[in-house]
């Protein structure tokens, strides 16, 4: 994680993504702007976060590790959205893992310094209720689409969602679990994409072929 210090860049973000729209008090003294590189953790799994993040740009994935060593992809986060709101509200103490898929720019709000103000701010809580409701509706919509479309369509959308710089690196076992298909079926469809010229395999990375 890198903290952005350039004044002109800070002004640009604050002007285009004003946090004041969500709070009834001045949140700026508790806020910084940070950048996460691809594959960098935004929230470390199992830890209690000390900050609430607002994703300004980029994409990230939410995952959960199991005792048997398997990892389940839970959801994908697209800007703009909050990250860490469930831990702030106390719905869970420890965070699920959140990792940047692409470079991500975030507002970082130090909740340890303004937790009481956040949890008593009706403007912020009203927005958070709307945000969580819209996320639940989106999850339902995604689940419905997963049941309605063939694997070729769902996998193509998944690759587009999780790729960065035309490179796709997700583990096949995790993707098969997320899409609700067998590992063998997933490999068959991926091989068909390569055969048809949509993708190219390079070691353990899959690359979009240029036309």
Image (cartoon, rainbow, N blue to C red):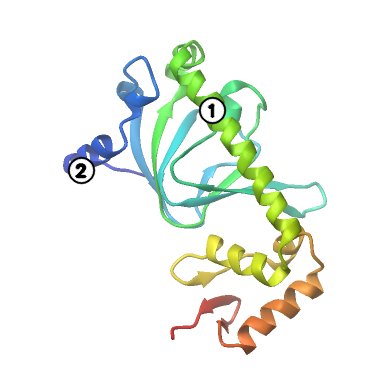
Name the residue located 46 percent from the left edge and 22 percent from the top edge: 111
Crowd around label 2: few <14 · some 14–19 · many ≥20 (10 Å) = few
As drawn, is 120 to the left or to the right of 73? Answer: left
| Image position of 104 with respect to 84: above or below | below
Name the residue located 59 percent from the left edge and 81 percent from the top edge: 203
Q: Give the quadrant of residue 12.
A: top left
> Which of the pair 108/82 is nearer the observer?
82
> Which of the pair 141/46 is nearer the observer?
141
Crowd around label 1: few <14 · some 14–19 · many ≥20 (10 Å) = few
Asked if marks 1 and 2 touch (Cβ < 8 Å), the reply is: no
Name the residue located 33 percent from the left edge and 33 percent from the top edge: 32
Q: Give the quadrant of residue 92.
A: top right
As drawn, is 207 to the left or to the right of 195? Answer: left
Q: Secondary structure at mark 2?
A: loop
Name the residue located 44 percent from the left edge and 86 percent from the top edge: 211
Provide residue 185's location: percent of width, then percent of height. Answer: 79, 74
Q: Residue at the front extreme? A: 148
Camera-side mark, 1 or 2: 1
Residue beneath disc 1: 130
N-terminal of the pair, mark 1 or mark 2, is: 2
Q: Give the quadrant of residue 91.
A: top right
Residue beneath disc 2: 6
As drawn, is 167 to the left or to the right of 4? Answer: right
| Image position of 51 with respect to 157: above or below | above
For marks 1 and 2, give the CA distance. 33 Å
Q: Is residue 73 visible?
A: no
Provide residue 46's location: percent of width, then percent of height. Answer: 66, 37
> Which of the pair 208/10 is nearer the observer?
208
Q: Secondary structure at mark 1?
A: helix
């Amino acid at each position: 994680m890198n903290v952005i210090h350039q004044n002109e860049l800070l002004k640009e973000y604050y002007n285009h993504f004003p946090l004041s729209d969500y709070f009834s008090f001045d949140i700026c003294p508790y806020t910084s702007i940070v950048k996460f590189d691809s594959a960098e953790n935004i929230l470390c799994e199992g830890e209690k976060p000390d900050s609430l993040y607002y994703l300004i740009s980029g994409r990230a994935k939410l995952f959960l590790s199991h005792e048997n060593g398997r990892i389940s992809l839970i959801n994908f986060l697209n800007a703009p959205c909050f990250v860490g709101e469930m831990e702030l509200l106390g719905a869970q103490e420890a965070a699920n893992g959140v990792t940047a898929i692409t470079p991500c720019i975030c507002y970082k709000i130090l909740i340890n310094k303004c937790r009481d103000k956040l949890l008593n701010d009706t403007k912020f809580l009203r927005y958070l209720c709307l945000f969580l409701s819209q996320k639940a509706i989106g999850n339902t919509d995604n689940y419905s689409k997963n049941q309605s479309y063939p694997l070729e369509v769902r996998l193509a959308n998944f690759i587009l969602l999780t790729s960065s710089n035309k490179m796709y690196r997700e583990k096949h076992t995790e993707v098969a679990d997320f899409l609700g298909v067998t590992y063998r079926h997933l490999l068959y469809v991926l091989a068909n994409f390569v055969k048809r010229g949509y993708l190219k395999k390079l070691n353990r990375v899959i690359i979009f072929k240029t036309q």
